[in-house]
Amino acid sequence: MGGGAVGGQARRRRGGPRGSRLAAAPGPHPRWTAGETEAGVDLCGHPLSRCRPGGAMKVLLLTGLGALFFAYYWDDNFNPASLQGARVLLTGASAGVGEELAYHYARLGSHLVLTAHTEALLQKVVGNCRKLGAPKVFYIAADMASPEVPGRVVQFALDKLGGLDYLVLNHLGSAPAGTRARSAQATRWLLQVNFLSYVQLTSLALPSLTDSRGSLVVVSSLLGRVPTSFSSPYSAAKFALDGFFGSLRRELDVQDVNVAITMCVLGLRDRAEAAEGVRGVTRARAAPGPKAALAVIRGGATRASGVFYPWRFRLLCLLRGWLPRPRAWFIRQELNVTAAPAAA
């Protein structure tokens, strides 16, 4: 019996009671390193992960942003056939994104009225649009710095097309980059071209767009969302566009007017004038005109509220809310100057 009892005790010592393998070992608790918790170890006390909580939050944030952008671009119901026969008034159509917009609309079979400052360039674009298959193409040379011009342009488009389905506002005036452009005279000129003419064209075309349940497509700039150096008058005009059309969108919603407004946030224009204006000042690269133009057309045709091209501009606009006043060192990374010159 004694031997049996001893054997039984030995077996109990080896096996122990059921579940004893999961019981905590006597003695002090193990010491956890920074970023580890008791839940982050296996049964033998080995850490399952050495990731810090901050790192996990970064992963979750990046995953969420990735899902947001994926959902944004995946939800695309663009139907090219919807633009066949559409009546489009396009401003700033002689070069850059505006020229590419004209070519895309021509390929899709839209009826066009094109306007820009230089008649010779407009004639070239009109000829190319006809070769690309546009059923109707008309043009009118116009200088938007003159307050009486927008009325003539809209009336010309209504006479030629019988109405409007799309008003695409793309024209711009850009004074040379630098502090010399901050004079009152230059600012007044920029506001007329880049803001007040947009308001005039919109007010005059809105009755026709209301009848056709059409769309307003406003080609703006990142500088209308995120201010940057050496562009204060231009940026002011672009911020004004964002405020005006954002407010107008709400007014139309309240009045149950079925006119869509699509704000397009683009980067540096792919045209010689824009590139020359910032030469030697910024390291930013121009967005490819054809791709940017196609993004604008897709946004307008799907009645999207906003278009960002390149897509990272949406993230930059979000970051501005978190970092409203970036440090001068950070800003200078995009500039070829070491300090801001005195105001002129």
Image: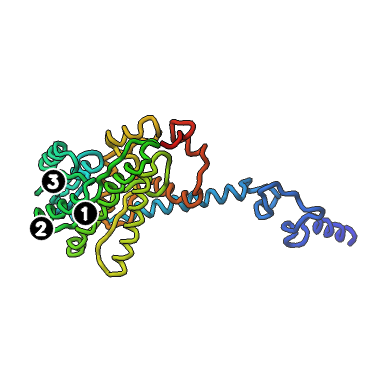
Q: Residue at x 83, y 56 (%)?
A: 10
The numbered disc on residue 256 is none
Name which residue lies at 25% across and 47% down. 170
In the rendered structure, the answer to whether residue 228 lies left or right of residue 277 reads right
Identified by mark 2, the residue type is Gly
**Residue identified by numbered label 2:** 162
Q: Secondary structure at mark 2?
A: loop
How packed mark 1 is, by other alpha carbons closer than 10 Å (few <14, some 14-19, many 20 or more), is many
Figure quadrant of the N terminus: bottom right
For residue 167, the mark is: 1
Between the residue at mark 3 and the residue at mark 2, the CA separation in whole angstroms equals: 16 Å
- The residue pinned by badge 3 equals 140
Q: Amino acid at mark 1?
A: Leu
Whether tag 3 and tag 2 are in contact, CB under 8 A, the answer is no
Q: What is the count of numbered marks?
A: 3
Amino acid type assigned to the residue bearing label 3 in the image: Ile
Image quarter of residue 211: bottom left
Q: Quadrant of residue 121?
A: top left
Question: Which callout, 3 or 2, points at the residue further toward the start of the chain?
Answer: 3
